[in-house]
């Protein structure tokens, strides 16, 4: 039977050609998440992209959903997808974009460039004292998935000693000097000059960074969060920075998004905030990677082959 494929990616002509070659014989409909209708979603056998989860309604027709994100939070909630629907995500597409963003935040904060940018705005020539070097630092990467490993490669290339923290054990990748499990995080935090968090949203990771854990960190440490904002509450992060438990932080994610205008976090001199823009399609290469994943999976799905990045509904991770 001919499959109805709904594409919600910003697909240009070359992308459509690639997808339609992979899905020869299928009926393709192109839209975007803002304009797509409930009727289009309910008629689709395959969706490539990011539909509004509320519009899926456990569709009986939907056989497979290929997300354009690595995060799966909204789609693994019971009742959103039919139990027979296969879910795959875009793990692997965002590693370059997010890792480089996190690396840029790391350099900005360790070199105090954020302070000099503030001075530039008020036309003041001043010296903010000593800085640190990654080549003399210990960096803890908490969450050693695709993005975490890409970031680890970057800081290791600068000469850092890299500690990888992950939920399950395994072989130590070449970008990491030492591998520990998440349950041992408290033994790592006092050693780290930089803590980079790239965790998904799970029951285990929610509010992982407590007041007690910031107390364990060096007062000279830098905290980076490009994973999920609810890994640390706004109140805990504010206390850690305003009480100088750590030196500085750079976050691309916050507990509440958009961050409310009256949040005291905006006023902190030692915090750099970017509005959850490290991913998305801000780096054009990311879209190319997503289309490649979608096209490869489409060909495999139609041939009853093995799909890449099949999501485990229990953990929310790709298996």
Image: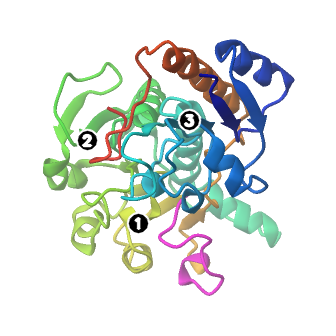
Give the x, y percent position of residue 172: 23, 23
Whether the magenta-drawn stretch holds residue 238 is answered as no
Viewer-side residue, 192 vs 83: 83
The outermost residue toward the front is 1
Circles 2 and 1: CB atoms closer than 8 Å: no
Whether the magenta-drawn stretch holds residue 254 is answered as yes
At a point 64% along the width and 63% down the height, the residue shown is: 115
For the residues marked 1 and 3, what is the alpha-carbon distance in whole angstroms? Answer: 20 Å
1 or 3: tag closer to the N-terminus: 3
Q: What's the magenta bit mostly, secondary-structure-wise? A: loop
Residue 123's disc is none
Q: Which region is colored magenta? A: 252-266
Give the mark toward the camera: 2 or 1.
1
Against 292, is 8 above or below? below
Which residue, given by chain and number where applicable, does mark 1 sit on? 230
Give the x, y percent position of residue 148: 41, 37
- The crowding category of the residue bearing disc 3, from other C-alpha atoms within 10 Å (few below 14, some 14 to 19, many at least 20), is many
At a point 44% along the width and 50% down the height, the residue shown is: 81
Give the mark toward the camera: 3 or 2.
3
Which residue, given by chain and number where applicable, does mark 2 sit on? 165
Occupied quadrant, residue 54: bottom right
Per the image, label 3 sits on a secondary structure element best described as loop
Give the x, y percent position of residue 229: 46, 63
Which residue, given by chain and number where applicable, does mark 3 sit on? 94
């Amino acid at each position: 039977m001919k499959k109805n494929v709904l594409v919600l990616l910003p697909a240009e002509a070359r992308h459509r050609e690639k997808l339609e070659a992979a899905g020869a014989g299928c009926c393709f409909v192109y839209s975007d998440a803002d304009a797509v209708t409930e009727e289009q979603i309910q008629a689709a056998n395959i969706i490539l992209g990011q539909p509004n989860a509320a519009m899926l309604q456990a569709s009986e027709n939907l056989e497979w959903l290929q997300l354009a994100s690595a995060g799966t939070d909204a789609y693994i909630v019971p009742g959103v997808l039919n139990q027979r629907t296969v879910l795959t995500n875009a793990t692997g597409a965002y590693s370059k974009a997010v890792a480089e963003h996190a690396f840029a935040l790391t350099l900005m904060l360790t070199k105090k460039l954020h302070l000099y940018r503030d001075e530039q705005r008020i036309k003041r020539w001043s010296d903010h004292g000593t800085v640190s070097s990654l080549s003399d630092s210990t960096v803890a990467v908490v969450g050693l998935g695709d993005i975490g490993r890409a970031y680890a490669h970057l800081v290791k290339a600068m000469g850092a000693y890299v500690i990888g923290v992950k939920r399950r054990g395994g072989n130590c990748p070449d970008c990491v000097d030492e591998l520990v499990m998440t349950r041992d995080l408290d033994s790592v935090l006092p050693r780290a000059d930089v803590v980079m968090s790239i965790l998904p949203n799970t029951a285990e990771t929610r509010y992982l960074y407590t007041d007690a854990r910031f107390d364990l960190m060096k007062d000279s440490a830098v905290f980076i969060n490009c994973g999920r904002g609810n890994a640390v509450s706004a109140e805990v992060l504010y206390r850690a920075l305003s009480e100088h438990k750590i030196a500085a932080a750079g976050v691309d994610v916050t507990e509440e998004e958009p961050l409310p205008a009256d949040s005291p976090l905006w006023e902190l001199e030692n915090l750099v905030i970017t509005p959850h823009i490290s991913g998305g399609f801000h780096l054009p290469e990311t879209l190319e990677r997503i289309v490649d994943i979608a096209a490869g999976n489409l060909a495999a799905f139609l041939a009853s082959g093995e799909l890449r990045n099949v999501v485990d509904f229990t953990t929310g991770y790709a298996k």
